[in-house]
Image (cartoon, grey):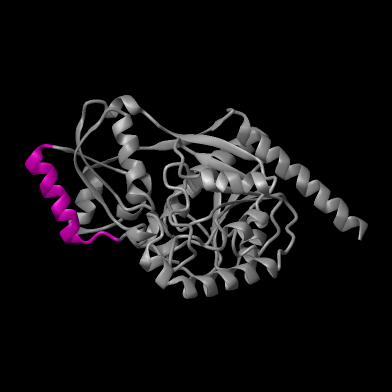
Amino acid sequence: MVSEAPPFWWSSSDWRAWLLFPASWIYGAVARTRMENAPRIEIDVPVICVGNFTVGGAGKTPTALALATAAKKAGLTPGFLSRGYRGSLRTTTVVDKAHHNARDVGDEPLLLAKKATTVITPDRHAGAKRLLEEGVDIIIMDDGFQSAAICFDFALLVIDATRGIGNGHVIPGGPMRAPLLDQMRNASALLVIGEGTAADRVIRSAGRAAKPVYSGYLKVIKRRSFKNKRVLAFAAIGNPDKFFDSLRSAGAQIVVERGFGDHHEFTDDEAADLLDLAAKNQLDIITTSKDMARLKDSRGRVAELAEKATVMEVQLNFEPADLAREFIDRSVQAFKKRRLVAEKY
């Protein structure tokens, strides 16, 4: 999957998108066929899939974390199933946050493992079975919507209201992982995060497909600690601008901002540049929890950057507040219905 998204993906369709349209059509046709013919192996617990239409930056991981919190409040034992993007381990593995690092399992699984049992795997069926062995009674998939390797009881597609689906073209001409209608057909609901009009096209599509549309927003934790601070902010996530905007909303003055490609591995030279800029301008260094997951257990100037940086934590809040519990309940109900059908036949 592409991590360094070209800027033209996130503007109106231009000659580059149309030049790549034949390749996008082929990619989309393959994605459609894969989704239509997916094995969808049934699992013996409820399964929620949190996905996004595009490559990176929609708010998928905060959504998964919020659902796990709601599941725990409902008396369930949630577990996360992840591909472990960019991790070196290629076998089904239970993430151990005390021993694994981002180079082993990927950055997002380390964040998920702080909340609940997390398994990374290239084989989602094997990963689901391992979660059951760990005592999990509801599985939350962080991505995997387009592959549909196992049966979902509830598929929640997340979209950023300020970014939308970019130019709307499928990879490589745009950021879409599959054609919009094909993805919407397999979704249970749409979650729009933040305020803006960029997701309006997708909201209209959801309406035509009779899919419910819900909303949420990212809230900065301990926002008072950032008020009036002069900072150097850096982020290597799907949408760094979202991080910068959140930091400004908390009252910070961003003197220097640096955005990098999603999952970027920082070099000593890049770390030294950030450290020197911060020291020269007497700035606090602020980054994201996802970036800190990659910076930890490093050496040299990268380790120094990790030591001097402060993480701005965010959490997803739903509107209404009990919406996450509703998603959990709907998943459990769909699972019970699925089991009754299976027992009947």
Asked whether 267 falls inside the magenta stretch, the response is yes
State the predominant SS element of the stretch in magenta: helix
Q: Residue at x 29, y 33 (%)?
A: 248
Q: Residue at x 43, y 67 (%)?
A: 173
Towards the viewer: 343 or 304: 343
Q: How many marks?
A: 0
Q: Is residue 327 left or right of residue 249?
A: right
Looking at the picture, how far across and down is residue 175, in whole percent? 45, 60
The quadrant of the image that shows the C terminus is bottom right
**Quadrant in the picture for residue 213:** top right
Towards the viewer: 196 or 52: 196
Looking at the picture, how far across and down is residue 64, in whole percent? 54, 45
**Quadrant in the picture for residue 313:** top left
Position of residue 227 relative to residue 209, above or below, is above
Looking at the picture, how far across and down is residue 123, in whole percent? 60, 68
The quadrant of the image that shows the N terminus is bottom left
The boundaries of the magenta stretch are 265-282
Asked whether 41 falls inside the magenta stretch, the response is no
Q: Is residue 136 left or right of residue 44?
A: left
Position of residue 107 relative to residue 70, above or below, is below
Q: Is residue 101 left or right of residue 153?
A: left
Q: Is residue 343 left or right of residue 264?
A: right
Position of residue 163 relative to residue 75, above or below, is below
Q: Is residue 82 visible?
A: yes
Q: Residue at x 57, y 62 (%)?
A: 179
**Quadrant in the picture for residue 224:** top left
Towards the viewer: 23 or 38: 23
Q: Is residue 101 visible?
A: no
